[in-house]
Amino acid sequence: MASAPYDDRDGWIWMDGEYRPWRDCNAHVLTHALHYGGAVFEGQRAYNGKIFKLKEHTERLFKSAELLGYEIPYTQDQINDACMELLEKNKLVDAYCRPIVWRGSEMMGVSAQNNTIHAAIAVWEWPSYFSPEARMKGLRLDISKWRRPAADTAPVHAKASGLYMICTMSKHAAEAKGYDDALMYDYRGQVAEATGANIFFVKDGDLHTPTPDCFLNGITRQTVIELAKKRQIKVIERAIMPEELEGFEQAFLTGSAAEVTPLSEIGPYRFEVGEITKTLMLDYDALVKGEA
Ligand SMILES: Cc1ncc(COP(=O)(O)O)c(C=O)c1O
């Protein structure tokens, strides 16, 4: 059954500095960000009442805004406090938390120099994308026709709403063919990432992952690299070409929403859900739940 629409739920949302009833948190149709894609956002998970790497997510939110050329009219501490208070106010301990910042409505052309910058934070229950059984079987990825743009084509290191247009198109095309998600190459034709998560491969006991020079260097990606190093697993960040996919034994995704999720297929290539993937899944799980 479909869950309740996101604009019609009980609870509280933090918006422009105050807590408001969920259903009252509207933006006008003539909001610049809606027309020109100028919102930046974060996606972070709370485990046992604590948001994992909250500080890092908020720092990225501010960096994303700066890359798009605007300043968030709050401090990072204010955003962090609001995220934590909001969890309590909504009586959630395990939840997804979505801060978003956007340009308002004062100017409606491409230029929006004087538009008010708005901010909101919502939290909701969002269990793992897939059941533990489905996850352990591994997800199936299609290969997208859309490519991650070059760093001089778009603000590729910002978590900006406009950059997700090709992600949604890629994911919809994959789902239409019965896949779970899509792998995107970059503008050079190198392996880049999935539509909302980074990607890793295992070969001969080592981890290989694309260098994040034109996509997000995910906070989960960085965490998993640290976890692998603690296990003495060698991590190689490099350009990965599509023809190498055939030679990898294991593959998995990383992301705050996706966590560590094994892959079983990418297009014609097959992968096993092997020991290194399972170990990193468990290590990540223990770390975010504060059990490590
Ligand atoms: C396109 C994209 N790449 C990578 C990631 C992984 O980033 P993180 O691990 O910081 O959540 C995400 C998720 O935020 C994403 O949307």
Image (cartoon, grey):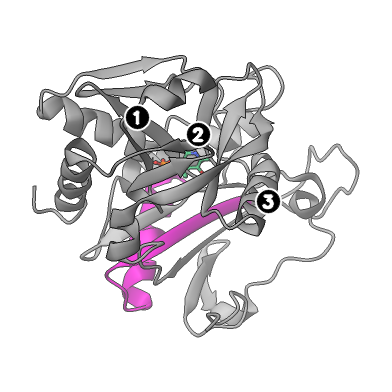
CA separation, marks 3 and 1?
24 Å
Picture residue at 80% right of the left edge, 45% below the top: 36
For marks 3 and 2, the one nearer the N-term is 3
Q: Position of residue 227 (x, y in %)?
A: 18, 33
Q: In this image, 116 relative to 218: left or right?
A: right
Asked whether the residues under the numbered discs 3 and 1 touch, taking CB atoms below 8 Å apart as contact, a structural biologist would say no
The correct choice, above or below, for 171 with respect to 7 in the image is above
Q: Secondary structure at mark 1?
A: strand
Q: Position of residue 15 (x, y in %)?
A: 56, 65
User: In front: mark 2 or mark 1?
Assistant: 1
Q: Position of residue 147 (x, y in %)?
A: 66, 30
Q: Residues within 10 Å of mark 1 (few under 14, many from 20)?
A: many
Report the amino acid beneath label 3.
Ala
Range of the magenta residues?
75-101
Look at the image and tell me whether residue 100 can be seen: yes
Report the amino acid beneath label 2.
Glu
For marks 3 and 1, the one nearer the N-term is 3
Query: Is residue 76 within the magenta segment?
Result: yes
Look at the image and tell me whether residue 69 can be seen: no
Which residue in the protein does label 1 denote?
Answer: 201
For marks 2 and 1, the one nearer the N-term is 2
Which residue in the protein does label 3 denote?
Answer: 173
Picture residue at 66% right of the left edge, 54% below the top: 172
Quarter holding residue 208: top left
Q: Residues within 10 Å of mark 3 (few under 14, many from 20)?
A: some
Which label was assigned to residue 177?
none
Which residue in the protein does label 2 denote?
Answer: 193
